[in-house]
Image (cartoon, grey):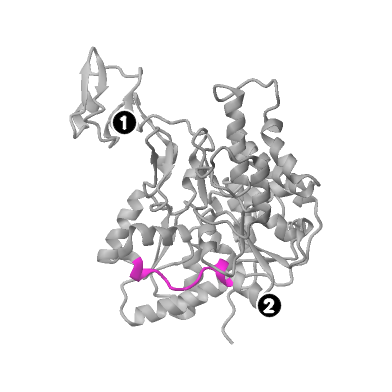
Amino acid sequence: MKDHLTNTKRWIVKKIAEAFWSDNFRQKIKRLPFERIPPGSDAKYRCCVYKERAIVRCRVLAGLGFSVEADDEMTSLLEYSDAALKRRQIEGPPLTIIDIACKGCVNARYYVTELCQGCLARPCETVCPFKAISVKGGHSKIDKDKCKNCGKCKEACPYHAIAKIAVPCEENCPVNAITKGEHGVATIDYNKCISCGCCVAACPFGAVLERSQVVDILGALKSRRTVVAITAPALVGQFNAPFSKLVTAMKKLGFSRVVEVAHGADKTAKEEADELRDRMDRGDSFMTTSCCPAYIQTVRRHMPEMLPHISDTPTPMHYTGEMVKSANPKALTVFVGPCVAKRREAMEDSCVDYIMTFEELASLFDAADINPAECEDTVIKDNASAEGRGFAVNSGVAAAVKAALGEGGQNVRIACIDGTGKSEIARMRSYAKNGGPFDLLEVMTCTGGCINGAGVIKRDAKAREDLLKFVSDSKHLIPEEK
């Protein structure tokens, strides 16, 4: 079930696509804020409809691929529409913030609710290591100046009377890259940002967005060039349709071919297996996988001590794009996946031209009135392996590498970081310094794996179940080298 925020985000991309396919793109884009909030509407979320329309305008800017922070408010949507059609590529950070959409949440802190009974035991006061809690008038009080937000008081209270006020974007950012700026609204330090998209998924006001490449992709599909969709394994389970029908649906959008990134994953697994074998032979303490671009950015920006342990093997997305480009150097590749961080990776990879999330793909299906479940099945002649398709779930990468090692992998010790947070980063720093009880460490920034990335449609158990069934039904294992 889609909530109001999801509906709003999907509506923006859908309307941009509809405008692109019309004969009056500029004027339709210009009218979107008024189409979303017609004259005579009452304000629902902000002080007035004018501010709400301004927020819609900013959402349209991000949907067209522009940075909201760089907007001078004097440039019209007509001009932005023209610029979107003319540009060759999107440059700069993949994320952007709508400051006027940000709620400006209060600082994260703990506070005592009316459930407090002023009990004699006073466990909250007893466990506080900073002497920040006192009891006055039969009610516990927290001194905000002394409190360090450790949460021990909340854990100790037998009445669950202590609550935490959270700031979702800040709390979910694993590297403290998003904070309140001088005006009390969210701001991103792009020197710290790893483009994981955790803030995008966490913000209930939708103030943090991706800069979409949908207009660029639609332009490519309209051209006479061959455009190939390379799809992440996590696609299965997102649309209530088998992969064979999703291929048909994407071809109806105009894609010439659809290639599974799981094919590239097979090559990554074999290359990482060879690399791990070489590293173990020379006495390295351990190796980490290279597939998660947010993890790679975390190491580059926040854990340089882990750099010697990162696999040098390219990602499945790179290898799949390379396969397509090798067969047809003039082809354009569009990675369709669940990951926000892939946008940054693609900026450094000439084998991948564009990135589109599952949410954006769903919006294009809506705009084109395509229901994947009602499409015919396309015969999949070149099935990927179970190991390659399993890259989308936690422990899948490590399992594929171990399988690729063959008999030599029986004694290889593997471990997984399932979701990267502040505590996991601290643990990895310790591993970099002291080693760990493993030879191969898989790191997934998103808990549960790529299937729970910031660009997915569904994060429920059914989506995971459908993907795992797709994996289990796959009969082609990683082939032996000839």
Is 24 magenta? The answer is: no
The quarter of the picture where residue 482 lies is bottom right
Q: Secondary structure at mark 1?
A: helix
What range of the chain is rendered magenta? 307-319
Which is nearer the eye, 212 or 75?
75
Q: Residue furthest top?
A: 137
Which residue corresponds to the image point at 64% horizontal and 20% vertical from the top-left? Answer: 42
Q: Is residue 2 visible?
A: no
The quarter of the picture where residue 147 lies is top left
Distance, label 1 to label 2, CA atoms, is: 59 Å
Q: Residue furthest front?
A: 74
344 left or right of 53 in image: left
Q: What percent of the width, then of the height, locates residue 467?
A: 61, 56
Amino acid type, callout 1: Lys
Return the residue at label 2: 327
Q: Earlier in the sequence, mark 1 or mark 2?
A: 1
Return the residue at label 1: 154
Is 312 magenta? The answer is: yes
